[in-house]
Image (cartoon, grey):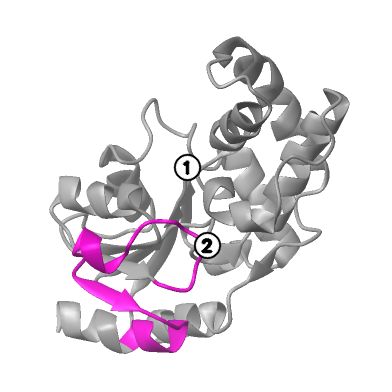
Amino acid sequence: MATVVFDLDGTLANTSGDLLAAANWCFRDMGYGDVLNDADAGTAVKGARAMLRLGLMRMGRPDDEAEIERQFPRLVSAYGDAIAVHTYLYPGAMEAVEALKSAGHGVAICTNKPEGLAHDLLNKLGVRDDFSALIGADTLPVRKPDPAPLREAVMRAGGDPSLCCLVGDTDTDRNTARALGVPSVLVTFGPGEDDMAALQPEALISHFDELPPVVATLFG
């Protein structure tokens, strides 16, 4: 059976609230107050540097890469200290995971969140043991959209890398799947700013209830 690999931020869970809170902690410490808001959730799921870059641009420092690198570890530390305050799993996510496992599919996670933070978050959400493997941004020397992390996630889950799909919410996920030559399924309910249909994935879902039948169609 195929292995279904999930992105984490913006796909399995809405993590934007805690990410934005960590970024605003940095901006307050710099004397700027809360620079980012809920409307910036799409930037939050792109990572710490993307949030710092946006905030500094708003503060009139659009090219201050040195400050971004200085604040990056501080943001990651602040995020790790309060990683599951506002974060929640999307409706139907774990029901879909269980349905896929019951159908004989492997399930794994491939995220560009650092592996340690991903483990901590999934443990706090109580779902780490529901996935056979987890590959983070720093598990391998490369990260998505390089196909190696996706391939490794499938192999650690006991699957065949040629028989898998990646469920995600960004062009990074689409491009990762494309690089490995496998299907992608993109969610339309996350905070990502990309036009999912324009990315031309093999499938789109608007709720996790739709995922098991989509996987059955892709690999039937």
* Residue in front for this viewpoint, 30 or 127: 30
Q: Amino acid at mark 1?
A: Asn
- Tag 2: Cα neighbours inside 10 Å, few (<14), some, or many (≥20)? many
The verdict on residue 59 being magenta is: no
Foreground mark, 1 or 2? 2
Residue at numbered disc 2: 191
Q: Amino acid at mark 2?
A: Pro
Q: Is residue 160 left or right of residue 207?
A: left
Boundaries of the magenta span:
188-212
Indicate the position of residue 109 as horizontal and vertical percent values: 45, 56
Disc 1 and disc 2: Cα gap in Å?
A: 16 Å
Indicate the position of residue 187 as horizontal and vertical percent values: 39, 71
Residue at numbered disc 1: 112
* Residue in front for this viewpoint, 191 or 212: 191
Residue 110 visible to an observer of this rendering = yes
Where on the picture, by quarter, is residue 199?
bottom left
Tell me which numbered mark, 1 or 2, is placed earlier along the sequence. 1
Where on the picture, by quarter, is residue 25?
top right
Indicate the position of residue 8 as horizontal and vertical percent values: 51, 57
Q: Count the numbered circles shown.
A: 2
- Tag 1: Cα neighbours inside 10 Å, few (<14), some, or many (≥20)? many
Query: Circle 2 — which element?
Result: loop
Q: Is residue 10 left or right of residue 87?
A: left
Indicate the position of residue 200 as horizontal and vertical percent values: 18, 64
* Residue in front for this viewpoint, 119 or 29: 29
